[in-house]
Image: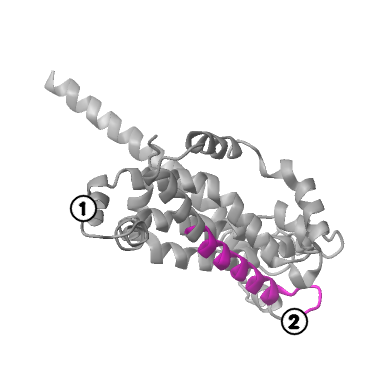
Amino acid sequence: MQTTMKTNRLLRLFFTYAFLLFMTVLILYPLLWTVGASFNPGNSLISTSIIPENPTLDHYRELFAGKESLQYGKWYLNSLKISIFTMLGSMITVSFTAYAFSRFRFKGRKNALMLFLLLQMIPQFAALIALFVLAQILGMMNSHWLLILLYIGGQIPMNTYLMKGYMDSIPMDLDESAKIDGASNTRIFWQILLPLSRPMLAVVAMNGFTGPLGDFVLSSVILRTPEAFTLPIGLYKLVNDVMGASYTTFAAGAILISIPIAVTFLLLQKQFVSGLTAGGTKG
């Protein structure tokens, strides 16, 4: 009996570690291949390898060479600008909406929550034509600020659910004690609920920052000139040129995109992990 239990335990451990190893290889292999391709000479992926025989930094230099057709530095700054303002705007709006749904009972509350849930089921590309027409009517084609507002609006439904679920886990006794001491709802929000909600705020911040950096569909509808491009659009144009496609330069540009994401994750790591585990949505 004891021998059988020990054997079963060893088998479970073996399959667990085998699965973890498989997932690690599945995640790291494309990343290592992209890193290797960025240091390989030439423009084609056919002759590239994970470990380059003659590594070169030419592709990284080419990104910042100042060519008119490759304004990588400009695209990088555009992406950072949009991501940072989207992150800040998402944190502010989601905090207010989540607080309202968590702490107040008002007419239409349940219907609004159901609407947020339904909005999450609608794919982004379903509204592309309407957003294109809206941008033209407002005269805001190529506008980063319109794109930021659209990203913030897209972040609100799901993040509100996450944030509301976290705020629901904070006891109402804290609010009632503060009100007895004369605190207003605004003071309770800023000095009690918001500091206690830092883990979930980190999740919202991470979602708001990484979303625009990886978006191509919506940004390509709004942004039409090279000076206004973000990194996904610019890098796509880099490999879309049939005659001058450079996949190795594309790989170098893709690697540099990961730097701000990695830095943001490291800064928010402690709060981020605890926020993900505590973000259940409660009615």
What's the magenta bit mostly, secondary-structure-wise? helix
Determine crowd level at label 1: few under 14, some 14-19, many 20+ residues with C-alpha closer than 10 A. Answer: few
* Amino acid tagged 1: Ser
Q: Which residue lies furthest to the bottom in this view?
A: 66
Q: Is mark 2 on a helix, strand or loop?
A: loop
**Image spot of residue 203 (x, y percent):** 43, 54
Q: Which residue lies furthest to the right in this view?
A: 243
At x 24%, y 25%, the residue is: 8
Q: Name the residue under label 1.
A: 177
Measured along the vertical axis of the image, is residue 189 above or below residue 9? below
* Amino acid tagged 2: Gly
Measured along the vertical axis of the image, is residue 143 above or below residue 17? below
Relative placement, left or right, of 279 versus 76 is left
Q: What element carries label 1?
A: helix
Relative placement, left or right, of 12 versus 226 is left
**Split into 4 quadrants, where in the image is the C terminus?**
top left
Relative placement, left or right, of 8 versus 134 is left
- In which image quadrant can residue 178 be found? bottom left
**Image spot of residue 281 (x, y percent):** 40, 38
Residues in magenta? 66-91
Residue 230 visible in the picture: no
On whether residue 45 falls in the magenta region, the answer is no
Residue 173 visible in the picture: yes
**Split into 4 quadrants, where in the image is the N terminus?**
top left
Q: How far apart are marks 2 and 1 (CA)?
A: 61 Å
Q: Name the residue under label 2.
A: 66
On whether residue 79 falls in the magenta region, the answer is yes
